[in-house]
Amino acid sequence: MEITPPSIEASSSFPNHIAIIMDGNGRWAKQRGLPRFKGHTAGVESARGVIRYLNDKYHLKYLTFYGFSTENWSRPKTEVFGILRLFERIMNAEARQLHQEGVRIHHLGRLEELPRGLQRVINRALKLTADNTGMTLSFAFNYGGRTEILDAVRNIIAKGIPAQQIDETLFNSYLYTADLPDVDLLIRTGGELRISNFLIWQSAYSEYYFSDVLWPDFNEAEIEKALLAYRQRQRRFGGL
């Protein structure tokens, strides 16, 4: 059955900001008797397809991927090194093409804790695409939601801002996502039913969509299922 795409003009039926937890790469590789790293490589191809589809067909304004969490450093060193090298290679290879498509690349997380070579590649991509006005494509890499909130609190304290001046608007301006809107639709693949410390402030009123499909198999048809589910919900933002 062909799914009719939601109206781009109707903000109530189409998300402005989609965030995705890309889960299942390792299990995808294991099912095929492959090293875990092959799953991450396949996951990159899936991410590339999702970006192109949402940008070309729907002109989505904001898309955020959870690429590497602050907890992921505890994984086997060979896997961590492979992920870091893969992300560096992808940023090098894709930044110019994304720039030509008007995409603005954005990084969320503690950049200073990443290897210097990767920092340089990310900063180069950020500078190259800084003035673009198309999709804002954010990568949460070395990111943790609680760490983000703690960093915001520390920076507010360091600025000496009086407690009575702190409200949600001010607090939001100190988050990594200061120039991004809250998440409308949060998608997690791989069958797990949790958000794993991802954008916990920004997704307070998000619609959640959990898919059993492993990330490397998450394709255009699966995106449409998520968008259809979103369109069928009535967002109340805390109302009864």
Image: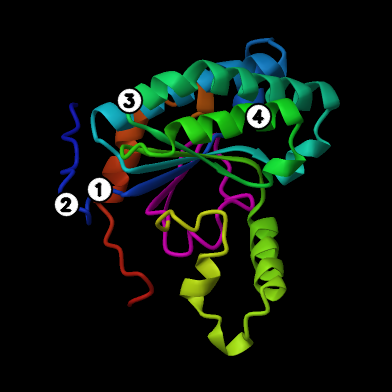
Number of numbered callouts drawn: 4
Give the distance between the C-alpha atoms of the residues marked 2 and 1, in whole angstroms.
6 Å
Give the distance between the C-alpha atoms of the residues marked 2 and 3, in whole angstroms.
24 Å
Indicate which disc, 4 or 1, sits on the residue closer to the N terminus: 1
The residue that appears at 57% across and 89% down in the rendered structure is 164
Around disc 4, counting alpha carbons within 10 Å, would you say few (fewer than 14), some (14 to 19), or many (20 or more)? Answer: some
The picture quadrant where one finds residue 80 is: top right
- Relative image position of residue 125 (x, y in whole percent): 52, 29
Q: Is residue 217 visible?
A: no
Q: In the rendered structure, which segment of residues is drawn in magenta?
A: 183-212
Q: Is residue 108 left or right of residue 238?
A: right
Q: Would you say residue 195 sits in the magenta stretch?
A: yes
| In this rendering, the label closer to the viewer, 4 or 3 | 4
The residue under label 1 is which amino acid type? Phe
The residue under label 4 is which amino acid type? Arg
The image's colouring method is rainbow
Q: Secondary structure at mark 1?
A: loop
Q: Secondary structure at mark 4?
A: helix
The answer to whether marks 4 and 1 mark residues whose Cβ atoms lie closer than 8 Å is no
